[in-house]
Amino acid sequence: MERSHLLLVGIDGLRLDLATEERAPQLRSLMARGATSWMTMPVPTISGPGWATLLTGASHEEHGVVDNTFVGSRLAGIPDLLSRAFFADSTRTTFAAAAWPPLVDPAGVGPVIHTRDEQRRSARHRVIVRDGETYGYRTADAEIADFATVGLLGFGPDVSLVYFSGVDESGHVYGAVSRQYAEAIARTDAHLGRLLAAVDHRARRGERWTVAVTTDHGHVDSGGHGGAEPEVVTSFVVRVAWNAELEAWPDEIDPTELTPRLLAALG
């Protein structure tokens, strides 16, 4: 049987209710074509603990990440989605690309995605890091999209994580109901469209692909997050499959279920 491939796209700080058809046609098309499950993110609704839970399946209490400093983190002993996929089948290749260093940077705090140096040296695990905190996410996200598109087209990793944070950055600076937040959604949706085109190209060869898109939290209208407001704790996962059937998921899942369910879909 043809090997299954998985691409997980993380869009930090996205309020799905503000990702309208006009602003996010790629994402809305995925929703129409595939399946959507909802999640309620636990407080504090901050990127560090949120992504740590989504990408490992561990609760806040288990992974010990309480903020973006990662002080007290126990992630070194908790394998992430990509690592668990590799440990289950050592012939798999994995790929991670992000401009928020704590997710993937081997030299930074965290990282949530384990470095797996042996696999990196043998090109079975590839990592692309940019520093959006220093240089801004508008530029850094575009570079991540470039590298990720090349990676998907060129070697078609078995399991990939691609992360964008421009939406979250705009939410903090301008607020969620601002023109700038809407424009950031549109830019990120265009990045998503490039990734989907690459997946579609590979799927036309007969490869089996699943793409999932999720977020770690939303924003209040004036900008910001961390609390329990409905627009902040509401998250989602959209799934679409090429040359494969989607497994049925409940309408609502716990954030700790995301990684185990994605792994189960890989087989």
Image (tube, helix red, strand yellow):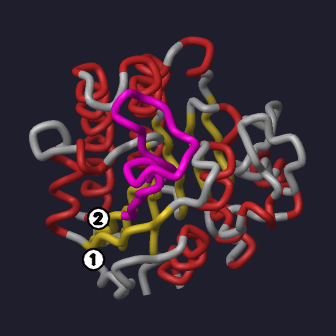
Q: Earlier in the sequence, mark 2 or mark 1?
A: 2
Q: Which residues are drawn in magenta?
A: 215-237
195 vs 105: above or below: below
**In the image, residue 17 above or below residue 88:** above
Q: Residue furthest left?
A: 22
Where is residue 229 drawn, in percent x and y? 45, 50
Q: Is residue 182 left or right of residue 119?
A: left
Residue marked by disc 1 = 243
Residue 131 coordinates in the image, percent (x, y): 62, 21
Horizontal side of residue 86 vs 219, given as left or right: right
Q: Nearer the viewer, residue 249 or 65?
A: 65
Disc 2 and disc 1 in contact, CB within 8 angstroms: yes
Q: Quadrant of residue 91?
A: bottom right
Q: Is residue 205 magenta?
A: no
Residue drawn at point x = 36 percent, y = 72 percent: 37
Q: Quadrant of the N terminus?
A: bottom left
Say which residue label 2 marks: 203
Residue drawn at the location 72% of the way across and 49% of the way down: 112
Which secondary structure is most common in the magenta stretch? loop
Q: In the figure, residue 31 lies in which quadrant? A: bottom left
Callout 1 amino acid: Asn
